[in-house]
Amino acid sequence: MDFTITPEAEEQISAALENQPDQDPPKDSVRIEAKTNGTTDFAYGLKLITSQECGSDDSVLEMERFKVVIDPQSARHLEGATLDFEDRIVRSGFRFKNPNNPEVPELGKGTRDDLVGATTEKLRRLIDTELNPAVAAHGGVITLVGVKGDQAYLSFGGGCHGCGMVDVTLKQGVETRIRELIPEISNVVDTTDHSTGENPFYS
C-alpha cells in the first residue's frame, strides 16, 4: 500500500520502541489505525505491538528499524497518506496528512413496497434491511427501542455512540428516511444519551 512515514515520525517511533520496559517478547512494531467516527475526519491511533500480534490479513510495511502494521479497513483509509511528527511550541506530536475523507453512510432512495403491517413491524424491517446496513460500515448499529403514538425511539450504538455527528445523521438522514417511508411516524427520538439518568421512552 502507499503509506509514508517521514524521518521525524520514524525517529519518534524508534525511540519509543527502544525506551520501552523489558518485555518478552519485546515490542518491535507499531500498529496504525484510522477509524471512522462520524465526523469529517478519521480517528487515528498508534500502538506498539509485537510481531506475534500481526493478523493474517494485516498489511505489514518494513521500515529500517521496525514494522508498521495496518488492518485492512485502516489500510483503505490511509492509502496515499503520510505520518509526520511536529515539534513546535504550540503543537507537538504525530500528524497525519491524509488525502482521504470518511464516507458518509448512504441510505436507500425511493419507495419500498415491502414495508407492510403495523408501524412497529415496518420500522423494524426498515432498520434491519436498510438503516443498519448503512451504518454498519462505520461500526454503528441502530436499535428500535419502541414506538409511542407518532414517535419512534431509537438507540444508536457501536461507532454511532458518542459520535459528534449522530444528531446530524439522525435529523438529516435516518429520520428523513423513516418519515418518507412510514408517514405515521412524525418524530424520531434518540435515546442513546442517558446523561440525565432517564430514558425518554419509559418516562
Image (tube, helix red, strand yellow):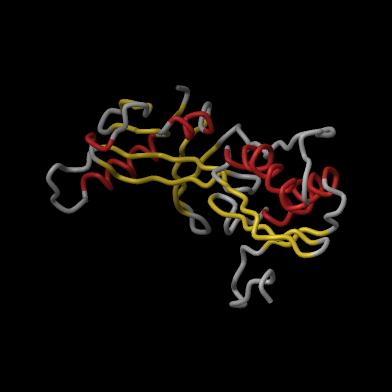
Please state which of residues 28 and 103 is positioned toward the viewer in this rendering. Answer: 103
Please state which of residues 195 and 63 is positioned toward the viewer in this rendering. Answer: 195
- Which of the 4 image quarters holds residue 188? bottom right
Quarter of the rendering occupied by the N terminus? top left
Residue at left offset 49%, top offset 40%: 34
Residue at left offset 30%, top offset 45%: 48
Residue at left offset 80%, top offset 44%: 177
Residue at left offset 52%, top offset 47%: 43
Decide: is 125 above or below 163.
above
Q: As drawn, which residue projects farthest toward the top?
A: 1
* Position in image of residue 86 (x %, y %): 47, 47
Quarter of the rendering occupied by the C terminus? bottom right
* Position in image of residue 52 (x %, y %): 22, 35
Apparent side of residue 119 relative to residue 54 in the rendered image (left or right):
right
* Position in image of residue 105 (x %, y %): 67, 39
* Position in image of residue 143 (x %, y %): 61, 53
